[in-house]
Image (cartoon, grey):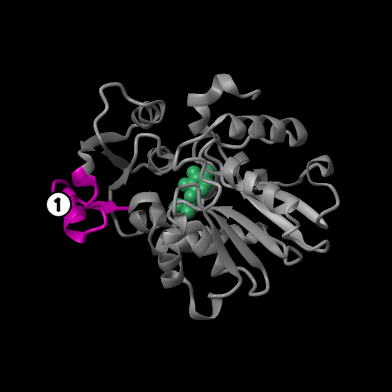
Amino acid sequence: MGIIDESRAIIQPLNRTWYGDRVAALDMLRLDLLHPVVSGNKWYKLRLNVQHAIDAGYKTIITPGGGYSNHLIATAFAAKMFGLKAIGVVRGRYDVLTPTLEACKANGMDLVFVTQEDYANRHQPEWAQKLVDNFDEIFMIPEGGANEWGRAGAGLINRFIGSSYTHIAVSVGTGTTMIGLRNKLDNYQQILGFAPMKHGTYLNTYIKEHLKIDKDTNWQLFDEWHFGGFGKWNNELLQFMNDFYRANDIPLDIVYTSKMMFGIGQMLQNNVFAEGDRILCIHSGGLQGNVSVKSELVY
Ligand SMILES: *Cc1c(COP(=O)(O)O)cnc(C)c1O
């Protein structure tokens, strides 16, 4: 699977003007540079899923997501790249398609719309089965790529992470990336998860369930920097994104990585870290989601 050029994913030190001398190193792994559409962690969560689908002889991938889902558009694109058909099961009805859904269609994905109530059943095997029964040779990827192939694929991000880093910061949606990484990182490396939704620590149980027994160590999930909930933001966050961009020349996304970096900034100010700590923040992409706030951003 060499279509995505992994050498684009550089490690960029953040500007000292942004964080001072509070820690020994604060770097960002730029997975957002991998590819304009299949960016960041989505590619890693999809690659072993797509490989499995091909190896097992499936012709079509079906996956659920919301109208602004980075996972949906990444799936549409990955399927196209590998000659598979893709069907997106979209939560809710849209009289006017969102830019994300337009892009899904433009990349050949068929969209099926289900009501919020119906979508709430998406984790039940019968729900998936009912969808799949309508089609031949179809492989179902759960929302956010949250399955064994997704976790194993996310674990491959480990190849970019040197052993000198003491802390790895990652944004959390389903928790798949965090789990995959925790399972691969060295035990002494702390993984800090940042949930962009209210009460995100409900994911602790799920994360724990999927960690290998000897890897259930040195991980923590924070949910205080949600800015009102998933997909919500305010002027303070926009201002932060613009300031961060001016200082570091790195665009953050409005849903995930901006909230994570805001949290890291607050933790630095609160002297949560030790002087010798070396922190690597993972830029998990998602920049396509910024179209709705484009006019507010300097990038
Ligand atoms: C999807 C996404 C996440 C969340 O990843 P999970 O593996 O579902 O926890 C984080 N950051 C960005 C930019 C994303 O698009």
In the orientation shown, which residue stands out farthest toward the top?
295
The answer to whether residue 79 is magenta is: no
Among the 4 quarters of the image, the one containing residue 174: bottom left
The residue lying at 74 percent from left, 50 percent from top is: 269
Q: Looking at the picture, how far across and down is residue 238, in whole percent?
A: 60, 30
- Whether residue 237 sits left or right of residue 76 in the image: it is right
Q: Looking at the picture, how far across and down is residue 49, in whole percent?
A: 39, 56
- Whether residue 16 sits left or right of residue 84 in the image: it is right
Alpha-carbon neighbours of circle 1 within 10 Å: few (<14), some, or many (≥20)?
few
Viewer-closest of 173 and 272:
272
Viewer-closest of 123 and 50:
123
The residue lying at 58 percent from left, 54 percent from top is: 170
* Residue named by callout 1: 130
- Whether residue 64 sits left or right of residue 235 in the image: it is left
Which span is picked out in magenta? 117-141
The residue lying at 24 percent from left, 49 percent from top is: 120
The answer to whether residue 122 is magenta is: yes
In the rendered view of the protein, which quadrant contains the C terminus?
A: top right
- Whether residue 68 sits left or right of residue 3 in the image: it is left
Q: Is residue 92 visible?
A: yes
Q: Is residue 47 visible?
A: no
Judged from the image, the secondary structure of the residue bearing numbered disc 1 is: helix
The residue lying at 51 percent from left, 34 percent from top is: 233
In the orientation shown, which residue stands out farthest toward the right?
21
Among the 4 quarters of the image, the one containing residue 237: top right
Viewer-closest of 236 and 14:
236
In the orientation shown, which residue stands out farthest toward the bottom?
214
Q: Looking at the picture, how far across and down is residue 254, in whole percent?
A: 54, 35
In the displayed structure, 282 sits above or below 93; it is below
Among the 4 quarters of the image, the one containing residue 79: top left
Amino acid under label 1?
Answer: Lys
